[in-house]
Amino acid sequence: QKEVEQNSGPLSVPEGAIASLNCTYSDRGSQSFFWYRQYSGKSPELIMFIYSNGDKEDGRFTAQLNKASQYVSLLIRDSQPSDSATYLCAVKLKTGANNLFFGTGTRLTVIP
Amino acid sequence: GAGVSQSPRYKVAKRGQDVALRCDPISGHVSLFWYQQALGQGPEFLTYFQNEAQLDKSGLPSDRFFAERPEGSVSTLKIQRTQQEDSAVYLCASSLGYRDQVSPLHFGNGTRLTVT
């Protein structure tokens, strides 16, 4: 079992809709959770991080964390075509080094 | 520039050749990471430095892979006797903190290695 699991998609939503991206992780002791966006041929860029249960909002983005269910999600409101990218979920374990474990990513397409 | 800089951007090597990939992290960032990203996959951890100390190299796939950061700044990832399965994008990332909880990684643009 991989440390971080994501549905690879592709996920298609119409412009203006809410896109919901989901991620589960295997290590119950995981500390911090990150969402990165990666455009084709580009490097990952950080969108949000969350480490407490509940919701964290930043503009059109909301990260949700449920440690009991070992589940983290990213909601994108009012989706725009420019949001079309691969979204990577990453987890930092409680023990071990500073490195992040990444999922395989979910490819999102926002249809104009 | 203020970001993580990697060179070369693209590298084509014949099977069996040695390659060296360079990473220049953000100034002042203590932690430096190397990741390998195959097509359609997420980044896979290779190795981690805190200043000049290599604290974790558990992700290096074989003893053909070697990384160093001798002065705690620029890092080089070296791959000896390259094989076709080494073809991937090699990402370098740096972060500000030691082991603080939410020090995010800042990635460079990567080096795309193709082994023919």
Image: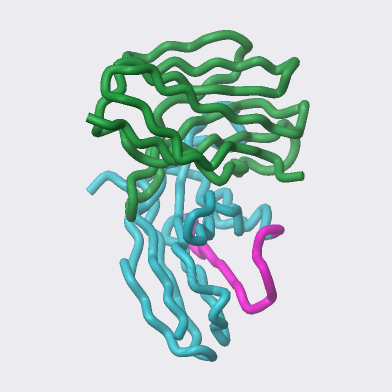
- Above or below, B41 against B80 in this view is above
Chain assigned green: A
Chain identifier, colour cyan: B
Q: Residue at x 50, y 58 (%)?
A: B37
Q: Position of residue A14 (x, y in %)?
A: 31, 25
Please state, as top left, top right, bottom left or bottom right, where the N terminus of chain A lies in the image. Answer: top right
Compare residues B77 and A46 and report the one nearer the observer.
A46
Residue A6 located within the stretch drawn in magenta: no
Q: In this view, does B63 lie above or below A81?
A: below
Relative to A96, B114 lies left or right: left
Q: In which quarter of the image is residue B91?
A: bottom left
Q: Main secondary structure of the magenta part?
A: loop
Query: Along the horizontal axis of the image, is A1 left or right of A21?
Result: right
Point out residue B56 in the picture as x, y percentages from the top left corner.
Answer: 68, 54
The span shown in magenta is: B58-72
x and y percent of residue B6 in the render?
Answer: 35, 61
Q: Residue at x 66, y 30 (%)?
A: A24
